[in-house]
Each structure stands twice: as C-alpha cells, then as structure tokens.
Image (cartoon, grey):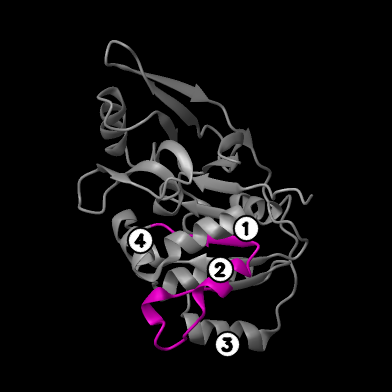
Amino acid sequence: MATAPVKRIFAMGGGGFTAEPSNPALDDYVLSLARRREPRILFLPTASGDPNAQIAAFHATFGNRACSAAHLSLFRLEQEPDDLRETILGQDVVYVGGGSMRNLLAIWREHGLDRVLREAWEAGVVLAGLSAGAMCWFEHGITRSTGRPAPVRGLGLLPGSFSVHYDGDPTRRPVFLDAIARGAMPAGYGADDGVGLLFENRAVVRIVSSRPQARAYRVQARADASVDEHVIEPELLQRGALGERRSVPTDIREFRAQRYGRR
C-alpha cells in the first residue's frame, strides 16, 4: 500500500523576498521543503492584486536559484489562459504573497482555487506564504482588509488561528488576544516578521526565523476570560545556507525585466 504524502504548510509572519531582499534565509528554507532537488515553485500574488513589482521581485529572487520559478496571475487570465488545476498540481511548492486576506479568499473561491489548493496540499505540494498568504490556511486570522484589524475566517486546512506582523504591526495583537479570550476565535499562534512555522499533517514541527530577537507566540484562552501568551524562541536560520544559486543568462534577465517590470 502506498504511503500517504506528508502534508506541509510553511506560514510566515512576514519577511521573505518582499520585505528582506538581502536576506534569503526564509526563501531558501521554503525551497528546502520540496521533495526534489530543483523544485517547481509557483507564486500566487493574488492578495495584492498581482502587482508587477511583486512578481518581478519573486523572479529576481528565485530566478537564479536551482528551481523552476513561475507565477499565476488570476487578474490576467484573459491574456494568459491556464488550466488552474493542472498548473497548481504540477508544482512542488506554491508560495502565496501578502495583501488583503478577504480579497484573496473571495477571488480564490470564485475560481475554485480553494478546492484545488486543498487537493494539492493533500497530494504533497508544499504550501507556503506570508502575511495574508500565511493566515489563509488557518481557521481564522486577523486581517486589515477593511482598514482596522478584524477576525476573518480562513480555509481551515490548519486548526486554530494565526496572527502575523506581531512586532511590525502592533495594532493586530490586542484584537487577536481579545478574540481568543472571548472565544470568538480558537487558540493559535502569533508570529513576528521574519518568523515561520512549519506544519506537517496539521501539527507544528519546527519554528524558524531569519532575524535575531524575532519570536513566535502560542496564545490560548484561560478560564478567567484572559489569555496565556507563551513566547517561543525560534531556530535562527543561517543566511544563504540552503539556496544553491545558478547563473542566469543576460538575455533571460532582460526578458524578465521587460515582462515583469524592474525593481
């Protein structure tokens, strides 16, 4: 009988190529989670409206690594039609960018990507993301899609709740703590920028960071309607320890710059 694939999700509180272009530690770690040496990685920039600058930053980061990097723009399907299910299931890693979690989930559901991504996860495709692209996998998150921080339901692939930018956007934390204390959201994790939590089969197995002093937090309700916020010290990743780079010809770099925009 065939062994079921390990289901992996890597949820980052912030950081990665969009926030730390000079520190590849988290992005290198994402690649290391794939099952093959030169993985196929797909970027979904839906939460920010598929901006050219974010797409260009992705290709600038992963284009010279030992991987096959591509992106999927749901806002431009009329220009580049794709079989979405075939595209997603053909990847080793799907990397989701930050932005509006509410908009992200609404657009995914309109295109049926919520079901396809669950299928990919169950098939062993690594799902990774930061900010909205991290909270979306949980039952609940704290979004600023409407301006002020507020609880929002996610896809529920992972149990519990998740709050990002714990240190970079301190307005989210009190809303997160209050929602858990009141029972409006289940217990969960908070993550500073630069911190990532690796889940295998719905359980956290490793917590890493690209930055010294960055932390993760386990938040649970107490019987007296307060919360217990337990600090977790992550493992500090070494810069450039995993990212095998390769030379990209000048003409390919120029093509990418023209198509995706210049940083």
Magenta residue check for 219? no
Which one is in front in this view, the residue at disc 3 or the one at disc 2? 2
Which one is in front in this view, the residue at disc 4 or the one at disc 2? 2
In the rendered image, which quarter is residue 207 located in? top right
Choose the circle earlier in sequence order: 1 or 3: 1
From which residue to which does the magenta span run? Answer: 71-98
Residue appearing at x 31%, y 27% in the figure: 180
Magenta residue check for 95? yes
Choose the circle earlier in sequence order: 4 or 2: 2
Crowding near the residue tagged with mark 1, few <14, some 14–19, many ≥20 C-alpha atoms within 10 Å: many
Per the image, label 1 sits on a secondary structure element best described as loop
Choose the circle earlier in sequence order: 4 or 3: 4
**Is 149 displayed left or right of 92 in the figure?**
left
Per the image, label 2 sits on a secondary structure element best described as helix
What label does residue 104 carry, if any?
4
The residue tagged 1 is: 125
**Is 259 displayed left or right of 1 in the figure?**
left
Residue type at numbered disc 4: Leu
- Label 3 vs label 2: CA separation? 24 Å
Residue type at numbered disc 2: Ile
6 or 254: nearer the viewer: 6
Which one is in front in this view, the residue at disc 1 or the one at disc 3? 1
The residue tagged 3 is: 255
Choose the circle earlier in sequence order: 3 or 2: 2
Which one is in front in this view, the residue at disc 4 or the one at disc 3? 4
